[in-house]
Amino acid sequence: MTFKPHGKHLIAGHWVEGDDTFASEPASGAPHNFAVGRISDVEAAATAAEDAFWTFGYSTRDERATFLNAIADEIEERAEAITQIGSKESGLPEMRLNGERGRTIGQLRLFADHILHGAYLDRRHDEAQPERQPLPRSDLRMMQRPIGPVAVFGASNFPLAFSTAGGDTAAAFAAGCPVVVKGHSAHPGTGEIIAEAIHAAVQKCGIHPGVFSLIQGGNRQVGTALVQHPLIKAVGFTGSLAGGRALYDLCAARSEPIPFFGELGSVNPMFIFSNAMENRGEAIAKGWAGSLTMGAGQFCTNPGVSVVIAGENADKFAKTAGEALSQVGAQTMLTDGIAAAYRTGQQRVAGATGVREILATSCDMRTATPYLYATTAKEWLANEELAEEVFGPLGVIVTADTVEEMREVAMNLQGQLTCTIHVDAEDTPAASDFMPILERKAGRILANGFPTGVEVSDTMVHGGPYPASTNFGATSVGTLSIRRFLRPVCYQDMPAGLLPSDL
Ligand code: NAP
């Protein structure tokens, strides 16, 4: 089945045309025209979302679980067409899109199970103590309630799992929040077919159609209007630091500021301790090359930096990594803009003081080839730019003279989604000194692995101190992510008939 997008927005159950259109820029196949989002679309979608909240926000957990599973079913029904359009628009291989669809469906079903279980409500009860001296205590009950309509911005590099029906949307629906998605202009057709699936589930389940809208992009005004709309009560964002920071600032500047849950970029450093390097440095180098180039390095968890102790083993590590990377050919990037930004980032690193080239390749148009550079810990510490994310398959080896200097690098890290240590048993004393530092720097700390590949589960934390995310108390992956769209409400001496049924 070939899917041909019609290019309209989905506003509260209606497919709506725009005044203007923009053309998609697929990596392959013909472009299509899509309606440019307008302020009036934001107004209509936010108003309908607020209307829907009065029923959806008070629906039962069973009803919402059925809805989440229905969306998963509808996505499954469109599997082939989703892969086709997703792969054309993003340039990601079909196999990757198939895997990402599985993950997206899995997330929806996981949230259905999660809310049925009910632990997320965090129900608490302090029984009344009428005889307590000097003051009696009231009956106090608490549980988490949905926050209201949520705006969602997906990222270009996960057209399914971090997009229209991705983790943010699934978590918001699970919590009881209607969603207005600002479609990503890198994959508008993929957004449309997923919106079609959500629309079908809304109809099947008889839910208020305002529960979901998709407004295509085509200009930045639609995103800025959406985060500033007074009826929007929280924002889930996955994307770049620049975009996330701009929208975060707008949320903070509103007369009623709202939480902005931005999951941004990260360099995801790896620290390779001396015994691990001695015993299996070459295997780590090869594994790193694989992780760094997966999906053309377009992962927020891409391990862009390896910190090693200078010496013969470090030289061997660099040589092996360079050789492994040189075997990887050119890969298509998600958009022309991302490919151009990759080259700018590469030139920034190549031109920085004290940076030595290990592997230089050449790429143009919408492709990326790997690059590998080395620098010393001293240079890295002196040059803030080297700590910035280059979105693509580029690695930097930072060579420290001593483990203390390696620790200095850790101390000076910005917030990260992940930090990785490679350790053997004999490295434990040295590594134990790093743990309190890394806990303050990252949402997830890994040992002897690579950070690409984020499990969707109860324990996952995909977030971290700024600039990895704008809200370090939150995660955008896993069931804990529902907490972003809930707020605690305390009920004091409330008659049973007035308490929420979940209490
Ligand atoms: P992006 O360019 O920031 O775009 C994300 C969304 O925000 C798009 O809808 C975009 O609109 C909108 N946007 C960006 N800047 C805006 C502004 N100033 N005003 C209004 N709207 C704005 O990000 P991307 O290129 O899609 O994603 C790649 C980045 O995401 C990488 O840095 C990667 O590390 C990061 N990422 C992070 C995670 C995570 O979980 N932490 C996951 C995946 C990716 P348009 O459609 O108009 O461009």
Image (cartoon, helix red, strand yellow):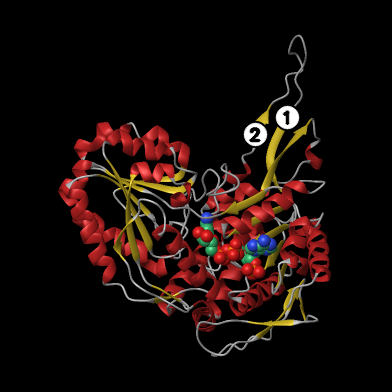
Please name whichever residue, 474 or 201, is drawn nearer the observer in this view of the structure.
Answer: 474
How far separated are the C-alphas under marks 1 and 2? Answer: 8 Å
Image location of residue 100, percent across then percent down: 47, 69
Image location of residue 139, percent across then percent down: 74, 27
Mark 1 or mark 2: name the one nearer the start of the chain. 2
Q: On the picture, is 21 further left or further right than 67?
A: right
Q: Residue at x 76, y 74 (%)?
A: 13
Crowding around mark 2 (Cα neighbors within 10 Å: few <14, some 14 to 19, many 20+) is few
What's the amino acid at mark 1? Leu
Tell me: residue 181, above or below residue 255.
below
Q: On the picture, is 344 further left or further right than 470?
A: left
Q: Secondary structure at mark 1?
A: strand
- The C terminus lies in quadrant: top right
Q: Residue at x 75, y 73 (%)?
A: 37
Image location of residue 499, percent across then percent down: 77, 41
The reply to whether discs 1 and 2 touch (Cβ–Cβ < 8 Å) is yes
Tell me: residue 31, above or below residue 184.
below
Please name whichever residue, 2 or 371, is drawn nearer the observer in this view of the structure.
Answer: 371
What's the amino acid at mark 2? Arg
Please name whichever residue, 123 or 103, is drawn nearer the observer in this view of the structure.
Answer: 103
Look at mark 2 in the image and give the residue it sits on: 124
Image location of residue 138, percent across then percent down: 77, 24
Tell me: residue 250, above or below residue 309.
below
Query: Which disc is residue 494 wearing?
Result: none
Quarter of image, ligand 1: bottom right
Crowding around mark 1 (Cα neighbors within 10 Å: few <14, some 14 to 19, many 20+) is some
Q: On the picture, is 123 further left or further right than 297?
A: right
Q: Secondary structure at mark 2?
A: strand
Look at mark 1 in the image and give the residue it sits on: 140
